[in-house]
């Protein structure tokens, strides 16, 4: 296959490159590129960021959140995960499966969009159809941090919680244990690049095309509107012990904006808390936006002895 080279580890740039190539680099035959991301969670185009990802864990551990142009579920990437993209009229993950089998890994396509080895998942992929061609892109877990993978996707009511952490560990695997001849992901990536390209031609993007990808990363894929603003309605509860007593916030969001909020608990107050709640409706559910909405408000009137920082910690601690 013909191929591109992509050395970026910026998930926003890499998501932009996928969309740019799908829409602009049209080919009669499939072409591919291999790439990696720094620690990040990539959610599907139609997923809700607030209900699919442990956002508190991401923030505490410096893990980025990005949204891709294809469907499917949330996935965790780090620098020990190799991603592949194949674009063309009828792209298939089969070349990657064949390449792994050629290296002695008994890989097979199983289910809707997974690659399994010995009954355990090592890769998942997603697809999108454009007017002129299709894209598939997927993961190849080489030596991914499974502890982090389980935590970032572990949210109340999630499939991860339902199946249990132990169950998840038993159903996924890193390719490193099947590839003793490849001590590093760099060595595996180089070999897969050679197998898949098989001496075919390198596709080189122009400076103008690369600049457009960078612009897309900056103006679309890294923005709050794209990452959070596409999230449809969801609800959740946050609970904390504040100086005024125990406070529980029941929050409803739609496209990242607070559409309804109510407070309950055994807290002490001087004025009805509904006044404060109404001031937060239509506010973005992010710390800086809520901080601005609370600016100037006498929070202690509604939560005796508490201040705006206490309310922010209720939402975001």
Image (cartoon, helix red, strand yellow):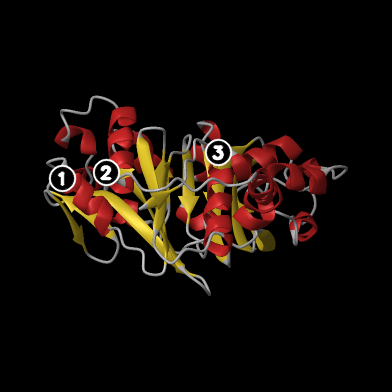
- Apparent side of residue 86 relative to residue 119 in the rendered image (left or right): right
Residue at far right of view: 296
Residue 139 x %, y %: 35, 48
Find disc 2 in the rendering and name its residue. 195
Q: Which mark is residue 102?
A: 1
Q: Residue at x 68, y 56 (%)?
A: 225
Residue 96 shows in this picture = yes
- SS state under label 1: helix
Q: Nearer the viewer, mark 2 or mark 3?
A: 2
Q: Residue at x 54, y 59 (%)?
A: 25
Residue 43 x %, y %: 48, 54
Give the CA separation, mark 2 to mark 3.
25 Å
Residue at far top of view: 183
- SS state under label 3: loop
Residue 175 x %, y %: 22, 38
Q: Residue at x 13, y 52 (%)?
A: 119
- Apparent side of residue 211 relative to residue 73 in the rendered image (left or right): right
- Apparent side of residue 291 relative to residue 88 in the rendered image (left or right): right
Find disc 3 in the rendering and name its residue. 10
Task: Tell which circle, 2 or 3, labels the residue nearer the N-terminal end.
Answer: 3
């Amino acid at each position: 296959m013909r191929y591109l080279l992509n050395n970026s580890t910026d998930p926003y740039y890499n998501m932009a490159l996928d969309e740019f190539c799908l829409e602009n680099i049209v080919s009669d035959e499939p072409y591919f590129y291999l790439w990696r991301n720094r620690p990040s969670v990539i959610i599907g185009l139609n997923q809700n960021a607030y209900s699919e990802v442990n956002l508190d864990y991401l923030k505490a551990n410096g893990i980025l959140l990005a949204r891709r142009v294809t469907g499917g579920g949330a996935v965790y990437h780090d620098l020990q995960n190799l991603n592949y993209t194949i674009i063309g009229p009828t792209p298939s993950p089969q070349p990657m499966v064949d390449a792994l089998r050629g290296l002695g890994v008994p890989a097979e396509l199983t289910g809707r969009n997974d690659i399994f080895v010995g009954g355990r998942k090592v890769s998942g992929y997603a697809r999108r159809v454009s007017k002129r061609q299709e894209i598939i892109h997927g993961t190849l877990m080489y030596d991914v941090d499974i502890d982090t993978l389980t935590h970032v996707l572990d949210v109340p009511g999630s499939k991860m919680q339902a199946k249990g952490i132990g169950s998840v560990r038993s159903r996924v695997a890193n390719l490193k244990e099947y590839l003793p001849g490849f001590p590093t992901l760099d060595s595996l990536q180089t070999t897969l690049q050679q197998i898949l390209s098989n001496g075919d031609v390198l596709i080189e993007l122009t400076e103008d095309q690369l600049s457009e990808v960078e612009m897309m990363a900056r103006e679309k894929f890294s923005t709050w509107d794209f990452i959070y603003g596409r999230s449809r309605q969801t609800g959740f509860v946050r609970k904390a012990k504040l100086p005024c007593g125990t406070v529980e916030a029941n929050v409803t969001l739609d496209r990242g904006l607070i559409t309804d909020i109510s407070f309950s608990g055994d807290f002490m107050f001087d004025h009805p808390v509904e006044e404060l709640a109404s001031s937060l409706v239509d506010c973005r559910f992010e710390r800086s936006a809520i901080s601005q909405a609370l600016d100037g408000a006498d929070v202690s009137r509604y939560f005796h002895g508490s201040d705006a920082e206490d309310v922010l910690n209720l939402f975001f601690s």
